Image (spheres, helix red, strand yellow):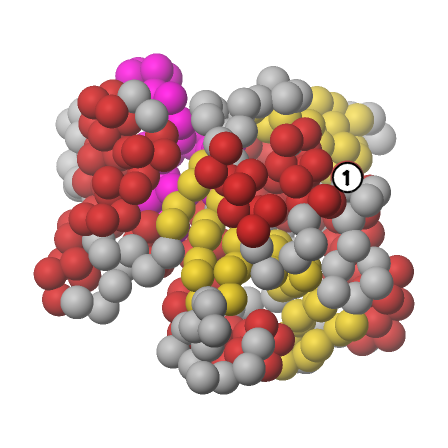
Amino acid sequence: MRAVRVVAFGGGHGLAAALRGLRRAAGEIDLDITAIVTVGDDGGSSGRLLAERDALLPVGDLRQALNALACDDAVEQRTAALMQHRFAGDDSLAGHPVGNLLLLGLLEMLGDPVDALDHAAAMVGAQGRVLPMARHAVGIEADVLGADPARPGEVVTVCGQHAVAVAHGHVEAVRISPADPPTCPQAIEAIRAADWLMFGPGSWYTSVLPHLLVPGLAEAIVASPARRLVTLNLATDNETSGLSVADHLAALSWYLPGLRVDTVLADAKWVGEPEPVHQAAESLGARLVLAPLAVADGSPRHDPESLGVALVPVLGPAR
């Protein structure tokens, strides 16, 4: 029997948690994992490299995904730890993780983002493949009600992934620029061949929804015969202030009307009143599965071990 093919969409810490959860589930189910990573990050080290080196892609979220998929062998784990090492100090290297510079070098040397990511994946023995959402960086902008404290009743356009992520107010709409960026053929192929498409957890407007705004990806997602899983966040952040758990699900169909979902996975403790979430899931054609997903210290962070345990009965039978 062949492996269950799972394609996970997202970026940052949310996608990394999902990938670690999938790695945990792969101990009981034979999984073939592909991560498709958002490429809108313009903050921190990634933003500096985009501005100073005219980098093809923001590399931070790609590095995080590679780290999450690194195999457990001691040598590969040391390499993964090296890629996560961030230079201290106040010189030109300060704040840059080694892995960001490595990926930048591979992008410049090889000229192809997929070749660069495949090479880096081999270096950490990645138990899956990492692909970018588009073949070059995209911009993210949002119309935000109340973003300007001096004009709380007005809608302001906020530009840049970092600015959107930290903006206060209610996001009315989100867009990417260019509106139709070139996608990776390998990403389209992975979506078409998938058994499961997995969305979330992660920053909804800047990590999850952008994938639905890329026409090539959106078309492939709607046409794919795969089942679809949405893993909900545990708590809201600045960009989803005022957005209920059910609203998170409604946003998916708002930005991709043809999207149908099979399963919504949520933490029973953090979901709040479950009935509105049940109804929102049903409106997408999905069943709601409640399971303990959070870390034990009570903070709103997904525990990869618990997420992996919850994913096993959803994705397929155990070995």
In this view, 273 is above or below 120: below
The answer to which quarter of the image holds residue 91 is top left
How far from the left and from the top, in percent, is residue 169? 72, 39
Kind of element beneath mark 1:
helix
Q: Bounds of the magenta span?
A: 37-65
How far from the left and from the top, in percent, is residue 239? 65, 43
Q: Residue at x 57, y 22 (%)?
A: 181
Q: Residue at x 83, y 71 (%)?
A: 278
How far from the left and from the top, in percent, is residue 59? 35, 35
How far from the left and from the top, in percent, is residue 305? 43, 77
Q: Residue at x 30, y 16 (%)?
A: 52
Camera-side residue of 292 and 107 = 107
Q: Residues within 10 Å of mark 1 (few under 14, many from 20)?
A: some
> Tag 1: residue type?
Tyr
The residue furthest front is: 1
Q: Is residue 39 magenta?
A: yes
Q: Residue at x 62, y 75 (%)?
A: 314
The answer to which quarter of the image holds residue 282 is bottom right
**In the displayed structure image, the side of residue 285 where residue 92 appears, left or right:** left
Locate the C terminus by quadrant: bottom left
In this view, 40 is above or below 72: above
Q: State the residue position of label 1.
A: 255
